[in-house]
Image (cartoon, rainbow, N blue to C red):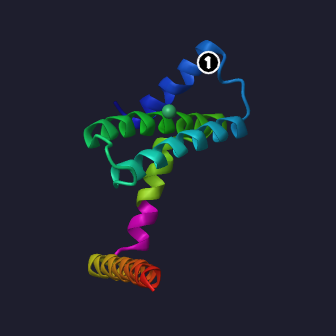
């Protein structure tokens, strides 16, 4: 399936049911609702709550991402955006922004070092809490 075919399918599916007759803001709220479901599952995937079956979480995440994409494609057709063309332009923008591969890799490493520093601070805070709790 091509991206434009999918967008056309979403629009035709909605129009056949009269579900295209809502404002883009309504569609955006639905997209945000789906994003919340995606967020809950990403937290579950990362172990926020124990006893979650990781494979089940992955399958649910696929479903919720699909739900989210439906509303994003719907929002696009409601305002006359061709998602395939928008993505093509996005690719060009990304290529122009990070043309130097070595520089982009270095930027990724800089960010991972920052993440490691953040995790170290979390350990310092939690170790501090543990030592103050013993006093
Ligand atoms: Mg959903």
In magenta, the rendered stretch is 92-99
x, y percent for residue 43: 42, 52
Q: Quadrant of the C terminus?
A: bottom left
Depth check: 5 or 29 in front?
A: 29
Left or right: 8, with 119 as reference point: right
x, y percent for residue 50: 34, 49
- 133 is higher (above) or lower (below) than 43: below
Q: Residue at x 27, y 43 (%)?
A: 54
x, y percent for residue 115: 37, 76
x, y percent for residue 92: 42, 61
25 inside magenta stretch: no
Q: Name the residue under label 1.
A: 15
Mark 1 sits near ligand 1, with its Cβ under 8 Å away: no
Q: Which residue is drawn at 48% across and 38% down?
A: 69
**Secondary structure at numbered mark 1:** helix
Depth check: 28 or 132 in front?
A: 132
């Amino acid at each position: 399936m091509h991206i434009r075919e999918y967008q056309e399918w979403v629009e035709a599916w909605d129009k056949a049911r009269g579900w295209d007759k809502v404002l883009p803001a309504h569609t955006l709220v639905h997209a945000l609702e789906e994003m919340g479901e995606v967020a809950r599952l990403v937290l579950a995937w990362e172990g926020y709550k124990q006893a979650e079956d990781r494979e089940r979480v992955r399958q649910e995440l696929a479903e919720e991402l699909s739900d989210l994409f439906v509303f994003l494609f719907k929002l696009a057709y409601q305002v006359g955006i061709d998602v395939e063309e928008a993505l093509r332009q996005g690719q060009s923008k990304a290529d122009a922004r990070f043309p130097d591969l070595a520089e982009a890799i270095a930027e990724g490493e800089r960010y991972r070092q920052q993440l490691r520093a953040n995790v170290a601070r979390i350990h310092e805070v939690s170790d501090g809490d543990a030592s103050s709790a013993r006093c």
